[in-house]
Image (cartoon, rainbow, N blue to C red):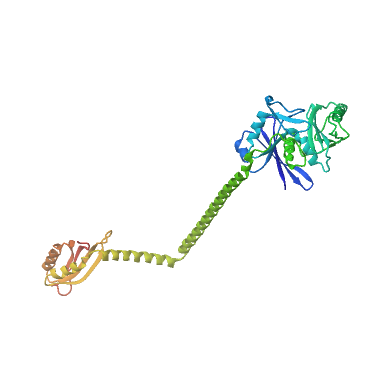
Amino acid sequence: MKKLSGISLTDDGSFLSVTVRRVHNGWEKGRVQHWPASSYVRNYLLLHRPVNLVLPGTWERRQPEDSSGNVADTDAVPFTITTNETELDHFSGLLRNNLDATYPDDAFLATLPYYFHENPQDSFITLFNEGRSCRLGIVIDRRFVTSLSTNCESESSLKGFLERLRLFFSTRLPHHRFPAVLYQLSRLPFEISEAEFIECGSDDPAVLKAMGGALCSEGTMTVPRIRDAYPEVNFRRFRSFIVATALLFVGITAVFSFALSMRCAFLSRQVEAARSAYLNLLENNTDIRKLITTGDELSRKVLRINRRVSQPSTWGPFLHQIGTRRPDGLFLERMGSEPVPGSYDRFRIALAGWCKTETIATDFIKKLNASPLLSEVTLSSMERTGKDRSICRFKILCILSTNQR
């Protein structure tokens, strides 16, 4: 679908952009945008779109002098369209990266009737109501010749003005046949039976001017061109490529980040579901809980054994001292041990046996106290038992430190 863009000035000096697009039965108005003319960012965002700018102008019979401050279309025949040079440089300069050409803002009097009519004539007069006056555009052989203004008090005054124009063209411009077909782009205060109304999708003058300027690029209608394209317009396609590449990169990065976050969230949900299932299984299975408890106990025992194995042991010297320091007449029947709570290298030792006299037992305790391996050696109990009261049974307690260096 072919699209053309035109930009006009509103009463407050801002830009109004209108897109016209070709449809199967002609043309139709598209998107309308409005923004401050000095908005550099908004003008830059036109990207690769080519636009036509329309500016107010004055139709004259001769070329303006260099000192007048006006510029003109040198190819306009027989009338010349002029516009203010300062405004032309300012407003066209704001759009220099996208500007295809600058045309007079009354170009819509020529282009809209031709492109929005199903079967347009090559020569016609366009009427447009400007409030207290009526704007007339004259098109001869698809060339926009000139536009003029007159009051629109009555049908007779308008017809009288048209008759004077016909007389002027027949006498002063005999090679330009004055057109007889009338087209209306807006309603007049009175009815003209010969005029045919053309609907363009809007009655806003700024919108119509922008639409008319956009259609100047179609090429079928000749409209005076005030300024051609700037050389900078060749940059716009490269600019669009750079912007599109940057946006693509940003988009790919955003999609990748989103996909990665979704993947992480999915995996987190799976981990949490597995954890919940595992905890639920442990909660409902007593055998597994018992197995875990047993495993913990075995782990602690293995740790304690590893600690003992990894450090120098005094069990051998302890047993050797028990054997060498045992006095005659004293016999050991049992020996037990258990770790001191909170310690892994100190053990509580219990020695049980019998002897003939108490003196032998006390002598054994003295010898044990002299050993650097033992501490807190005490006689826990001693008694005579059995039928033979001559035997004393005893129990000795002491602390063995297995980490002696």
Q: What is the quadrant of residue 50 in the picture?
A: top right
Nearest the viewer among 193 and 366 is 193
* Quadrant (top left, top right, bottom left, bottom right) of the C terminus: bottom left
Q: Do we see residue 13 in this rendering?
A: no
Taking the image as shown, residue 223 lies to the left or right of residue 280, namely: right
Q: Picture quarter containing residue 354?
A: bottom left
Q: Is residue 141 above or below residue 167?
A: below
Considering every residue shown, the one lying at the far bottom of the view is: 387
Residue 386 percent location from the top left of the image: 18, 73
Residue found at the very far top of the displayed protein: 67
Q: Which of the two residues, 177 or 48, is positioned nearer the viewer here?
A: 177
Q: Judge from the rendering whether residue 373 lies leftward or rightward of residue 157; answer left or right.
A: left
Is residue 254 shown to the viewer in this render? yes
Q: Is residue 85 left or right of residue 277?
A: right
Q: Position of residue 168 (x, y in %)?
A: 85, 28
Q: Quadrant of residue 52?
A: top right
Front in this rendered view, residue 44 or 142: 142
Name above or below for residue 270 compared with residue 122. below
Counting from the top left corner in percent of width and height, residue 332 is at: 18, 71
Write the residue at 63% across / 42% down: 234
